[in-house]
Image (spheres, rainbow, N blue to C red):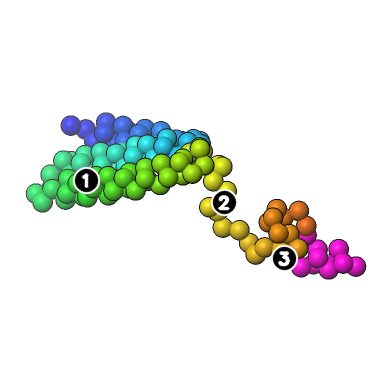
Amino acid sequence: MHLAYPAVLAALLFSVGLYGVLARRNAILVLMSVELMLNAVNLNLVAFDVWLRDTLHAGQALTLFVIVIAAAEIGIGLAIVLLVYRNRGSSDVDRLTDLAEHGPRDPHDPQGEGDGPSAPEEKAEAAA
C-alpha cells in the first residue's frame, strides 16, 4: 500500500474540518468539524504505523488515546452546548459575547456598552 493515498485522504479530511471550524456558526457543527480533524490525525497515525511496520504498534495505541480524548471532549462539549442552548435559545457561536473577556469597565458607563472614550488620552481630551 502506498502511503500517499491515506495521507491525501487525511489532508482532505483535515481541510474540511478546518473549514468547518472557521466558517460555521453553530456550535454543534464546530464540534463535528473538530472530530473530523481528529479522525484525520487518527488516519495518519495508523497509516504511518503500517508503513513503518512498527512492532509495538505505537500509532494504533496513540489512535486509541485520541479516540478516548475525542469522546471525552464531545461529551463535555455537548453538555456545554446544551446548557447554552437551554439558557439562551441559540447555539450560535457569534452570539456568545457575554462569555468573552472584556477590558476594565468605565464607571460612567453602567451598561458596559463602551460608547464613551476608551483610552485615558481620549478621556483627557474629552474633559478639556
Residue nearest the viewer, comparing 76 with 59: 76
Give the residue pinned by disc 3.
Answer: 107
Q: Residues within 10 Å of mark 1 (few under 14, many from 20)?
A: many
Q: Secondary structure at mark 1?
A: helix
Give the residue pinned by disc 2.
Answer: 98
Q: Earlier in the sequence, mark 2 or mark 1?
A: 1
Residue nearest the viewer, comparing 30 with 98: 98
Q: Residue at x 63, y 61 (%)?
A: 103
Q: Residues within 10 Å of mark 2 (few under 14, many from 20)?
A: few
Residue 104 magenta-highlighted: no
Residue 14 visible here: no
Q: Closer to the observer: label 3 or label 1?
A: 3
Specify the farthest residue to the right. Answer: 128
Image quadrant in which the C terminus is located:
bottom right
Q: Which residues are magenta?
A: 117-128
Q: Earlier in the sequence, mark 3 or mark 2?
A: 2
Give the residue pinned by disc 1.
Answer: 63
Residue 124 magenta-highlighted: yes
**What is the three-letter code of the residue carrying label 1?**
Thr
Q: Residue at x 31, y 36 (%)?
A: 10
Residue 23 visible here: yes
Q: Earlier in the sequence, mark 3 or mark 1?
A: 1
Is 111 situated above or below 88? below
